[in-house]
Amino acid sequence: MTKLIMQSLRLTLAFTVLTGLAYPLLVTGIAKAFFRDQANGSLVSRNGRTVGSALLSQKFEGQRFFWPRPSASDFGAVPSGASNLGPTSQILQSNVLARVQAFRGAHAMSGSASVPADMVFQSGSGLDPHISPLSAELQIHRIAGARKTSDSALAALVARFTEPPQFGFLGEFRVNVLLLNLALDQEPKVGSDVH
Amino acid sequence: MKTNDIVQVLVFFILLIGLAPLLGRYMARVFTGESTLLSKLLAPLEKAVYRSGGIQPNEEMSWKQYFLAVLIFNLVGIASFWGIMMTQAWLPLNPMKMGNVPWDLALNTAISFITNTNWQAYSGENTLSYFTQMAGLTVHNFLSAATGIAVLLALARGMRRATVQKLGNFWVDVTRSTIYVLLPLALCMAVVLAGQGVTQTLSAYAEAQTLEGAKQVIPLGPTASQVAIKQLGTNGGGFFGQNSAHPFENPTPLTNFIEVFGLLIVAASLVFTFGLMIGDRRHAWCIFSVMLILLAGSFAVAWWAESQPNPVTANVLPQLEGKEMRFGVMNSVLFATATTGTSCGAVNSMHDSFMPIAGMMPLWNLMLGCIVFGGVGAGLYGMLMHVLIVVFIAGLMVGRTPEYLGKKIQAWEAAWAIVAILLPNILILVGSAIAVSVPAGLAGLGNSGPHGLSEILYGYSSCAANNGSAFAGLSANSVFFNLSLGAAMFIGRFGCIFAVLAIAGSLAVKKTVPASPGTFPTDGLTFTLVLLGIILIVGALTFFPALCLGPIVEHGLMVSGRAF
C-alpha cells in the first residue's frame, strides 16, 4: 500500500511537470511566436489605447452606435454569464416582450414588425461579439440620423463588415459590433461632421 | 433547416466515420506495444516517466491490484488537487491574486476533475489562479481521460486473454495513453485554437476603455492548452465559466467544429481499437453503429424541437436564448447532443434555455450513462456492460449458457454488469428525489414549474454519468450540492470501474471456447438491433416517469402558452 501511494505521488508529480507545466508553456511559446495578437486576447487599440477585444462584446447604448445583443451579465466579463432562463420562464417572457417593444420604439418600427431574435434573446456567453446582418440593417437609419450621414453609406459599411460562414459553410452570417462601431468613428464620411 | 446546416452535418459525420478507424488503428498499435511513427520521439519520455514514478513496466496486475492502483492514484490526485486549490493564494502564477478556494467547492471540483466529470460550481475567471488551471485542471484532464482508457484496456485484455490472472499494468496504460495519444493530439489542437483567437498567455487580465468610455476588464489566461484536452479527453471543464460559449474559448465556427469533433473522435476511435484488440472488427462496427444511431437520433429530435416556435416568448425564431450568433441553432444542438452522448460536458450554448424536448435529449443521453461514444474509455466500457446483458438475455432465451467472444457469461458477469448499469440510475433518481424534498435542494433552483425538476434531474444525471454539463440555472455552489453531487460523481465513477474490472478479472481466467451453432453471433444485424433495443428499453423503463414530470409536461404547458 505504501508502495502504491508513493508511486501515485511520484507519477502525479511527473505528470504535473509534463502536462501541467511543460505542455501549457510549450503551447504558450508557440502561440506567442506565431499568433501573438490572438494569444493575447485579440485586443483592439485606438490611438494607442486599448478599447476592447475584437472577440468580446461591450456595452453600446448611445444613438451613434450599433447595439449588440443583450447580455445577462450586463457585459461584465469577470465573470460573464447567461440568463439560463427556461422556455416557460415568466421572467424570460417579460424580458423578451420588453426588448421587442424597446427595439421597435428605438427604430421607428410598427407595432407588428418582427424584431430579430438575436436582439431579444441573451447570448450564451454574455459577451457575444456578433449580431445578425438583419439586426445591423435595422439600426442603420437610427445611427444615420444621429451622425447626420446617409443610410446608404452605413449600409455599405455594414455590408463590408458582414462575415460569411467560415470557408463558405461553417457557422452563420454575422457582423462584429465593436469592429463595425470603430469603423463608424473612423470613416471620414460618417464620423467627421459629428463632433 | 438551411442547406448550409445540412452540409455541415454531413461533413461532420463523414469525417467522424472516416477518421475514427484510422486513429483507432494507431491507438491499437500504441496499446499493444508496437512501434509507431511517434515512438522514436516519445519513447524516451515514456521511460523517463516510469523512472520518476519508480514503475516496473513489465509487472502485470490482477484485477484487484489494477483496481487498487486506479483507486489510490485517483485518491492521491484528489488530495493533491484539493490542496492546490485551497492554497492557490500562496502559489505562483496568480497575477489576479485569486484567494484560496473554499473547502467544499475545492473538494467538489477535485472530485469532479479526477472523475472526468468536470462539473463546475464556479467560474474560472473569478475563482482560479493560472497555476490551478494548469497544474490542477489541465493535468487531471489528461489523467482522468487516461484512467478511462486504461480501464477499457484492462477489460479488453480480460476478454481477449484466457486462463490468466493478469490484466496489464495500470501505470503503463495511463502513461502510454497520455504520452502517445492525448498529448500529441492536444498539442496540435491547442495551436490551431490559439491561431483562431483562443487566448494563451500568462499575463494579467487586460483593461480596456470602451468606445462609450466605460471600463472593461478582459480576462485572459493559458486557455488554448486547457481547452484542447478538455475536448479530446471528454472532460468538459471550461477555463471560463461560460465554457465553449465564451468567445475566448471558442471564437470561430472553425474552432467550434474542431471542438465538437475533438470531443467525439478519441472515444469513437477507441471502439475500433477495442475491435482490433479482441480481434473482431465486425463486432466493433456493430457497436459503433449503435452509438452513431443513438447520437444521430438524439441530435435529430433536439434539432427539430429547437426549431419550433415558443408561444411563451412571442414565437420569436430562431431560438437564440443562451446561444451564440456565430454558431446558430444547428451547431448549438449538435454540440449539446455530442457533449452529453460522450461524457464531455463542455457546452457552447446554455442547455437550460433549450426548448423542453430539445433539452430533454441531452438529459436522455446522460441518463443512458453517456455511452454514445461516451467518455474516453468510460463510454465504451459502459456500452460493453449493455452488450453483456444482451448476450446474457439472448442466451437465456435459447436456453444455452451465454457466450461472448468465446467466454461463458455467467452469474458473476451478469450481476456486475447490472450493477454498473443500475448504479448511476439509482444515484440519479434517489439523489434528485432527496434534492426536491429538502429546502437546501430547492434553494438552488433557477427556474420554477416543471423546468425546476429538470434542472435538478439534469444535475444528478450529469454527475452520476460523469458528464459535467448543467442546466446551469441551478445554483450548485452550496454545501448541500457540492457534497451530494460530489458523492454522485465519485460513486458513479469508481463504482462502475470496480464492476468493470471485476468482470475483466473473471473473464481473464476463463477458457476460450470455440463458437458453436448455438452461440449468439455478436457481429450481425440482429445483435445490433437487440443491443439498441435493450439500451432504449432499460433507459425508458427507468426514467420515463421522471421525464414525464419534467420536460414532457413542460412541453405541453409551453405549447398552450403557460409560463411560471
Image (tube, rainbow, N blue to C red):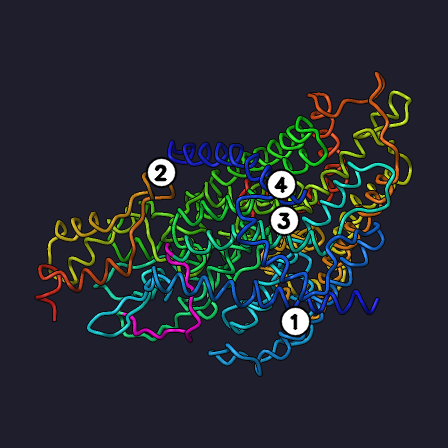
Q: Quadrant of the C terminus of chain B?
A: bottom right
Please say if the residues under marks 2 and 1 sit with CB atoms less than 8 Å apart.
no
> Are tags 3 and 4 found on a single chain?
yes
Foreground mark, 1 or 4? 4
Residue stretch rendered in magenta on the structure: B195-210
Q: Chain of mark 2?
A: A
First in residue order: circle 1 vs circle 3: 1
CA neighbours of label 4 inside 10 A, class few (<14), some (14 to 19), many (20+): some
| Distance in Å between CA atoms under marks 2 and 3 | 28 Å
Q: Chain of mark 1?
A: B
> Which is nearer the N-term, disc 3 or disc 4?
4
**In the structure shown, which secondary structural element does the residue marked by tag 1 occupy?**
helix
Tell me the number on the disc at residue B343.
Answer: 3
Q: Which residue is mark 4?
A: B29
Q: Nearer the viewer, residue A40 or B142?
A: B142
Give the residue drawn at x 85%, y 53%.
Answer: B64
Q: Determine whether the residue tagged by mark 2 lies in a helix, strand or loop.
A: loop
List the residue tagged with mark 1.
B106
